[in-house]
Image (tube, rainbow, N blue to C red):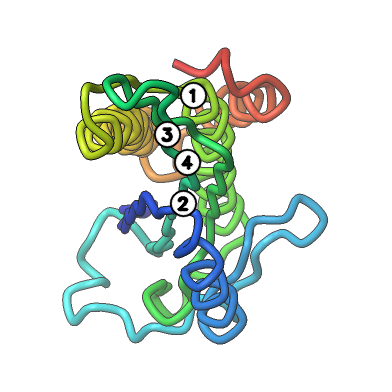
């Protein structure tokens, strides 16, 4: 019983810029974001946005807003000045819930709905892990100039990220459809099993 909203951001930063970006992200996380953590499941007090005016007439009783951000550090080098190689040196992929953008209809704070929302969060974590794995495999790109090597590496990273995040969006919609926003108990149980399997082995997720 919910419709997920999702925000995605991606940056590819040169190594000298990576630290500055990371510091800003860490500060922002402390103020407004809740990181996914198996040991700390979400609770209704994290759904802090006022529901839309028509929320009482929607199929979903709640909406969880999540953000996946990725950062890549890289270096570029050449041995002869005519061939340049851009190489990924680090990948960081973060995944958070945004309490100020998440809402629940008053009087519908049921345990079954909260479990449904938690699985949305878990499903996003599956694809955070898959994205991290795939970005790390995008290790090098070669060009005839330094800028070309950077551009090719940047394009490759964004192509991978865009594909994974689009698949995540599709899977979130499918999860809502098949579980009828938590009302189909059999499908809810099936998805819970699937998502837990994918958390253990993210590369096996569709």
Q: Earlier in the sequence, mark 1 or mark 3?
A: 1
For the residues labelled 4 and 2, the Cα–Cα distance comes to 14 Å
Q: Establish if 185 lies above or below 144.
A: below
Residue 8 circle label: none
Residue contact at pointers 1 and 4, CB within 8 angstroms: no
Q: Residue at x 56, y 48 (%)?
A: 92
CA–CA distance between discs 4 and 3? 45 Å
Q: Residue at the left extreme?
A: 54
Q: Nearer the viewer, mark 4 or mark 2?
A: 4
Separation of marks 1 and 4 at Cα, in angstroms? 11 Å
Residue at image mark 4: 75
Q: Which residue is mark 1?
A: 139
> Which disc number belongs to residue 71?
2
x then y, percent, for residue 16: 49, 62
Nearer to us of marks 1 and 4 is 4
* SS class, disc 1: loop
The residue identified by callout 3 is: 179
* Mark found first going from the N terminus, 4 or 3: 4
**Looking at the image, can residue 194 be seen?**
yes
User: From the viewer's perspective, is 61 left or right of 36?
Assistant: left
Q: Quadrant of the C terminus?
A: top left
Quick check: marks 1 and 2 in contact, CB under 8 Å? no
Q: Nearer the viewer, residue 81 or 135?
A: 81
User: What crowding class fits label 1: few (fewer than 14 Cα within 10 Å), some (14-19), or many (20 or more)?
Assistant: some
Q: Secondary structure at mark 2?
A: strand
**Cα–Cα span, label 1 and label 3:** 38 Å
Residue at 31 percent of width and 79 percent of height: 51
| Residue 93 in the image, given as x and y percentages of width and height | 53, 48
Distance from disc 1 to disc 2, alpha carbons, whole Å, reads 14 Å
């Amino acid at each position: 019983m919910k419709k997920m909203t999702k925000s995605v951001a991606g940056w590819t930063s040169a190594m000298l810029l990576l630290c500055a970006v990371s510091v800003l992200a860490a500060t922002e996380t402390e103020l407004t974001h809740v990181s996914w953590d198996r040991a700390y499941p979400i609770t209704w007090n994290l759904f802090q946005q006022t529901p839309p005016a028509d929320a009482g007439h929607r199929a979903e009783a709640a909406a969880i807003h999540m953000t996946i951000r990725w950062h890549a550090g890289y270096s570029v080098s050449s041995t002869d000045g005519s061939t340049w190689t851009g190489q990924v040196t680090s990948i960081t992929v973060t995944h958070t819930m945004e309490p100020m953008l998440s809402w629940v209809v008053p009087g519908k704070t049921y345990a079954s709905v909260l479990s449904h929302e938690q699985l949305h969060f878990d499903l996003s974590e599956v694809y955070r892990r898959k994205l991290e794995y795939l970005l790390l495999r995008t290790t090098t790109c070669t060009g005839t100039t330094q800028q070309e090597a950077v551009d090719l590496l940047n394009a490759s990273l964004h192509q991978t990220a865009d594909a994974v995040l689009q698949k995540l969006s599709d899977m979130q919609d499918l999860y809502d459809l098949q579980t009828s926003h938590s009302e189909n108990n059999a499908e809810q149980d099936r998805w819970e099993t699937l998502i837990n399997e994918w958390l253990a082995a993210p590369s096996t997720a569709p």
